[in-house]
């Protein structure tokens, strides 16, 4: 998993509450478990004017000019500014896969659905919870200066808007460590390889019938 320490990047606003995982990546595109190849279909029903189907060439599809991800000032955005209850709906891990594959590394919102929030940390995305009034102020700042950049520093746990004051955010120490070191569930388990191997050796001696 890609490590996360600090980025300074363009912020794209998505001014909608209760964005569910089917909106993030519609079900018809969930035909792979490779974690890649989903970026073209991120927010598919909002980004494009036609109905998306698996296998389409995204470059040939008509795009919705009013959707922020299609607007020139937000190209290359790595930070998504959202509203409350982002990532609700199903538990599909394809949602953070699609965000990451598109290039989003940070999502800022007043609240997240629990499963989506946890899945972000397993896939190199930093979900930041900030009070609603602060998120409101950030939306105003982005609207006044489309294409503005924020700096997000995981080490100091701060979000700093362009020419603004640093805003602190809370984060569990274990989740912070995983992102800083790029550890998904498998990598975290592999750090205990010797302990696991020793356990299996002892078990073969104490319960040999299980390994016959």
Image (tube, rainbow, N blue to C red):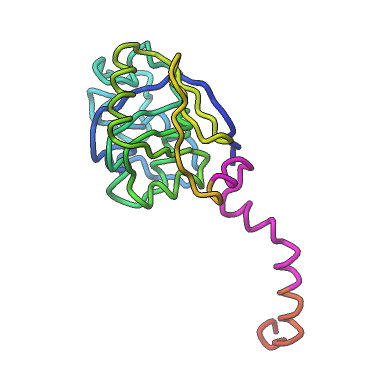
Residue at 35%, 28% in the rendered image: 81
For this view, does 189 lie left or right of residue 124? right
Where's residue 50, x and y in %? 23, 25
Residue at 42%, 31% in the rendered image: 39
Where's residue 45, x and y in %? 25, 31
As displayed, is residue 93 above or below residue 136? below
Q: Is residue 185 magenta?
A: yes
From this viewpoint, which residue is outermost toward the front?
A: 165
Q: Is residue 180 magenta?
A: yes
Between 133 and 28, the one nearer to me in the picture: 133
As displayed, is residue 195 above or below residue 20? below
Q: In the rendered image, is residue 102 in sight?
A: no
Stretch of the chain drawn in magenta: 176-198
For this view, does 25 lie left or right of residue 18? right
Residue at 30%, 34% in the rendered image: 53
As displayed, is residue 185 above or below residue 47? below
Between 74 and 92, the one nearer to me in the picture: 74
Most prominent secondary structure in the magenta stretch? helix
Residue at 48%, 45% in the rendered image: 171
Where's residue 207, x and y in %? 70, 87
- Occupied quadrant, residue 143: top left
């Amino acid at each position: 998993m890609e490590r996360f320490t600090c980025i300074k990047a363009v912020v794209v606003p998505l001014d909608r509450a209760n964005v569910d995982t089917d909106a993030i990546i519609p079900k018809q595109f969930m035909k792979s478990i490779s974690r890649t190849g989903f970026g073209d279909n991120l927010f598919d029903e909002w980004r494009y004017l036609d109905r998306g189907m698996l296998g389409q060439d995204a470059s040939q599809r008509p795009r919705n000019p009013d959707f922020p991800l299609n607007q020139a000032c937000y190209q290359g955005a790595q930070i998504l500014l959202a509203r409350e209850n982002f990532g609700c709906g199903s538990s599909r891990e394809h949602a953070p896969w699609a965000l990451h594959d598109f290039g989003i590394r940070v999502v800022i919102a007043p609240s997240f659905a629990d499963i989506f929030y946890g899945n972000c940390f397993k896939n190199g995305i930093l979900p930041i919870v900030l009070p609603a009034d602060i998120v409101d102020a950030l939306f105003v700042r982005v609207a006044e200066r489309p294409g503005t950049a924020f700096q997000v520093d995981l080490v100091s746990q701060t979000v700093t808007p362009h020419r603004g004051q640093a805003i602190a955010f809370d984060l569990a120490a274990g989740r912070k460590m995983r992102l800083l070191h790029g550890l998904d569930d498998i990598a975290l388990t592999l750090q205990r390889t010797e302990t696991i191997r020793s356990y299996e050796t002892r078990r073969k001696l104490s319960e040999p019938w299980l390994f016959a």
